[in-house]
Image (cartoon, rainbow, N blue to C red):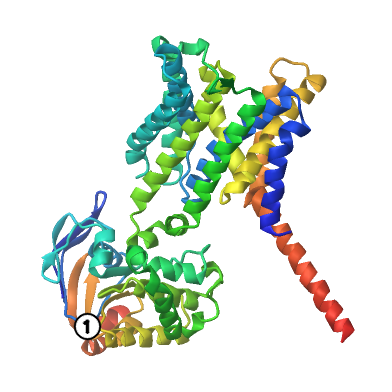
């Protein structure tokens, strides 16, 4: 099947989803997939294309959510103004954090971003006067367009419009001179530098962009869920984002979305099934963690390019087989 | 064209170059030879702006460029081909060549397809492989590709780090001829080699480095028969 048709099929499915599954539960899952997809697309750009590991994306997600939450509940801002404010703050923080952190490479960068994520998480818990502490923020306003309140179905389309915008922007970046340079950095940073690519600047720009994506997702999350606590932005969430990117295929924007959908649905299935089999209190969390570990092992062994890579390989095989059949038919005819 | 005076470079606490002096005239091919760890690649990296010198001068076309970053030096015509080839494995041959012209992509975008065709005419082994992933090329082809990629940057001073590393003798001969042909195009070349014979055979002059200092220098032909070079690097007693 042509790539174009796969994309059309995916768009049709996304558009019809709220009508095919009309319950609020399924629509909410659709919204969560969209919100997480925005974060993971940024992560795919950073990890898959530029080869920079980040384990602190949940912190930028939190900055977007909390800025929106604090500005709207505490200072009377319109959510539509609070959203760009959150994106700007997260971008600025990414610039400050990325400046020293992106001079580190490989595991050290992953550790630096992980530490940043932990610092933000603890600050969210400690700064009760601003963030509400461990209890979190409540009473965050819903989004309105004119006088129309965006309920689940409308919110679903808003989120997926944001996903489409982020995917379109990322697609253009990947297929530009910058995208080529990013893949060059991924393969050999030294060789890219030798050709005059300002590798540090490019990595920093991408880090800031991925933080901006995460903050946008955070704001959308805040105005949808309308109540949250620091637990929604912990280390585990950063790891989940990384797993989603790895499962979908880090060097593919659409793979990222696929990874998010798969992991989110898997979590929902586990939450429904595990209590029936294992009634112990922490069984779901334990099984989730184990499953994520297993997914990573399986992906690294059998699908190093993720689901997107696996699908591409299947397409290649299918096309090769079809070419073979056509050739054999021609030979038989002759 | 290039004068390096008292160049000092350290990697962390380890000092690699201890006041190195070399000079290169316009249109020359200069070989820098020496054992592993002598500081050859570090010297090239410092000239290309990859490593920041802790002392000394790098005077290029009358200006001290020591400490300037690579992206500035590439625009001024200093381009390094790093060791172990380092193609962008996931990218096609065409995209690798296109990246060579990174710094002038915006201003000269319309000229680049013709320039890539010219490079492919020069490196015939790459012709017809434009869409092939660079990582799937043979070692010799990859070496040709990285030299072609560097030529897309229009260098005045080309720095080649171990171009013969891990290649069959026949390919090394081809690379030698190729490097010589670059001079005819007005390029100045510094080639760093552990393969002493290959390095000196392609060069006009040579420098022998030991522990971050030049210990012998002279015409390449003379160095090839110099008993100190022969004893130390060519296995003759």
- Taking the spot 31% from the left edge, 68% from the top edge, the residue there is B80
**The residue positioned farthest toward the right in the image shown:** A332
Q: Nearer the viewer, residue A62 or B47?
A: A62
Q: Quadrant of the C terminus of chain A?
A: bottom right
The residue depicted at 35 percent of the width and 63 percent of the height is B106
SS label for mark 1? loop
In front of the other: B97 or B45: B97
The percent coordinates of residue B170 (x first, y second) are: 46, 87
Q: In which quarter of the image is the N terminus of chain A?
A: bottom right
Q: Quadrant of residue B100?
A: bottom left
| Above/below status of B203 relative to A268 | below
Q: Which residue is drawn at 46% across and 28% down?
A: A59
Q: Mark 1 lies on which chain?
A: B
Q: In this view, does B211 lie to the left or right of A221?
A: left
Q: Is residue A301 visible?
A: no
The reply, left or right, for residue B43 in relation to residue B21 is: right
Give the x, y percent position of residue B189: 27, 78
* Residue A242 lies in quadrant: top right
Which percent across, then down, holds residue B155? Answer: 28, 73
Outermost residue on the front side: it is A146
Q: In which quarter of the image is residue B169?
A: bottom left
Q: Does residue A210 appear left or right of residue A249 in this picture?
A: left
Q: Mark 1 points at which residue?
A: B28
Please tell me how crowded label 1 is: few (under 14), some (14-19), or many (20+) other residues with Cα within 10 Å. Answer: some
């Amino acid at each position: 099947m042509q790539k174009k048709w796969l994309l059309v099929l995916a768009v049709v499915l996304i558009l019809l989803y709220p009508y095919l599954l009309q319950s609020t539960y399924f629509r909410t899952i659709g919204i969560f997939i969209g919100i997480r997809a925005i974060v993971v697309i940024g992560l795919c750009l950073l990890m898959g294309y530029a080869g920079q590991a980040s384990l602190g994306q949940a912190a930028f997600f939190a900055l977007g959510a909390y800025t929106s939450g604090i500005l709207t509940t505490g200072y009377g801002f319109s959510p539509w103004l609070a959203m760009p404010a959150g994106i700007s703050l997260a971008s600025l923080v990414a610039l400050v954090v990325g400046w020293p952190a992106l001079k580190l490479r490989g595991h050290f960068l992953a550790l630096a971003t992980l530490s940043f994520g932990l610092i933000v998480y603890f600050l969210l818990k400690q700064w009760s006067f601003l963030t509400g502490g461990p209890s979190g923020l409540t009473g965050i306003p819903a989004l309105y367009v004119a006088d129309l309140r965006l309920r689940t179905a409308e919110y679903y389309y808003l989120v997926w419009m944001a996903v489409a915008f982020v995917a379109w922007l990322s697609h253009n970046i990947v297929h530009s001179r910058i995208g080529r340079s990013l893949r060059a950095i991924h393969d050999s940073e030294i060789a890219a530098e030798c050709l005059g690519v300002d590798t540090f600047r490019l990595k920093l720009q991408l880090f800031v962009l991925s933080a901006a994506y995460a903050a946008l997702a955070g704001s959308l999350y805040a105005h949808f869920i309308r109540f949250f606590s620091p637990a929604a932005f912990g280390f585990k969430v950063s790891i989940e984002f990384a797993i989603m990117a790895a499962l979908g295929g880090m060097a593919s924007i659409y793979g990222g979305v696929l990874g998010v959908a798969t992991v989110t649905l898997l979590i929902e299935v586990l939450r429904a099934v595990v209590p029936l089999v294992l009634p112990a209190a922490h069984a779901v969390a334990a099984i989730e963690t184990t499953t994520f570990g297993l997914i990573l092992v399986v992906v690294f062994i059998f699908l190093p390019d993720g689901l997107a890579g696996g699908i591409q390989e299947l397409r290649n095989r299918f096309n090769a087989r079809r070419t073979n059949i056509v050739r054999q038919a021609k030979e038989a005819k002759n | 064209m290039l004068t390096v005076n008292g160049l000092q470079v350290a990697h962390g606490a380890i000092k690699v170059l201890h006041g190195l002096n070399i000079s290169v005239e316009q249109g020359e091919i200069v070989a820098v030879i020496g054992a592993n760890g002598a500081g050859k690649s570090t010297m090239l990296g410092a000239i290309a702006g990859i490593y920041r010198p802790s002392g000394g001068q790098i005077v290029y076309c009358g200006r001290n460029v020591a400490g300037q970053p690579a992206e500035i030096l590439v625009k001024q015509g200093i381009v390094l081909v790093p060791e172990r080839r380092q193609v962008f494995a996931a990218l096609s041959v065409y995209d690798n060549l296109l990246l060579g012209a990174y710094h002038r992509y915006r201003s000269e975008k319309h000229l680049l397809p013709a320039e890539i065709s010219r490079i492919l005419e020069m490196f015939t082994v790459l012709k017809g492989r434009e869409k092939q992933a660079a990582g799937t090329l043979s070692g010799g082809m990859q070496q040709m590709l990285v030299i072609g990629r560097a030529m897309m940057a229009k260098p005045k001073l080309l720095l080649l780090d171990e171009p013969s590393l891990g290649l069959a003798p026949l390919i090394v001969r081809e690379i030698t001829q190729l490097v010589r042909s670059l001079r005819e195009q007005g390029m100045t070349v510094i080639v760093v080699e552990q393969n002493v014979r290959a390095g000196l055979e392609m060069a006009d002059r040579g420098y022998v480095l030991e522990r971050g200092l030049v210990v012998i220098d002279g015409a390449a032909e003379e160095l090839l028969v110099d008993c100190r070079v022969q004893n130390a690097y060519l296995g003759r007693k």
